[in-house]
Amino acid sequence: MGSSVFKIFLMMAGCSFSLMPAQQKDVKLFFQRTCAACHGLDGSARGLNGQKLPGRVLSDARWQGSKKDADLVKSILKGKGGMPSFQSQLSEAEVETLVAEIIRPLAARKK
Ligand code: HEC
């Protein structure tokens, strides 16, 4: 009796794992919830009312061009100046995805 409950638990655990094949966090959601507080949703370092936020402008294409992915990944993981470290919340692979899929495309966007 006890062991069949355990089997059902294992089946359920198996299901929930197969529902999330990507073990990575949703980096877009993470950016919107956490990073946008300082950098703005569009990387302009402006809030929804146009107010100045504490982060640097991430949407500046010329600045982005001067930075390698590895530089940005390191700054995000370790922190830089007024930016906290995120290595306890994001893996290196997640930060690489964040840079490639969220930060890089911000530079292409018109403000
Ligand atoms: C508390 C405010 C704050 C939060 C939250 C924050 N940042 Fe920053 N960020 C800053 C500041 C300030 C700088 C400028 C640091 C400097 O150059 O001294 C910065 C710089 C950066 C840079 C440029 C790094 C470099 O090498 O020049 C990137 C990329 C960046 N942030 C991405 C992110 C991402 C991604 C997140 C969310 C995981 C995030 N930031 C969250 C404040 C913040």
Image: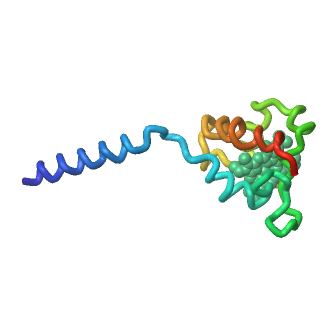
Identity of the residue furthest to the bottom in this view: 49
Q: Position of residue 96 (x, y in %)?
A: 67, 35
Q: Position of residue 43 (x, y in %)?
A: 81, 51
Is 72 left, or right, of 94 in this rendering?
A: right
- Between residues 83 and 15, which one lies in front from this camera angle? 15
- Between residues 85 and 59, which one lies in front from this camera angle? 59
The vertical placement of 37 against 27, above or below, is: below
Q: Is residue 83 visible?
A: no
Q: Residue at x 19, y 49 (%)?
A: 8
The vertical placement of 70 against 50, above or below, is: above
Is 79 left, or right, of 94 in this rendering?
A: right
User: How many numbered discs, if any?
Assistant: 0
The vertical placement of 66 against 46, above or below, is: above
Q: Residue at x 63, y 52 (%)?
A: 30
Q: Quadrant of residue 66?
A: top right
Is 107 left, or right, of 84 in this rendering?
A: right
Identity of the residue furthest to the front in this view: 110
Q: Position of residue 86 (x, y in %)?
A: 67, 48
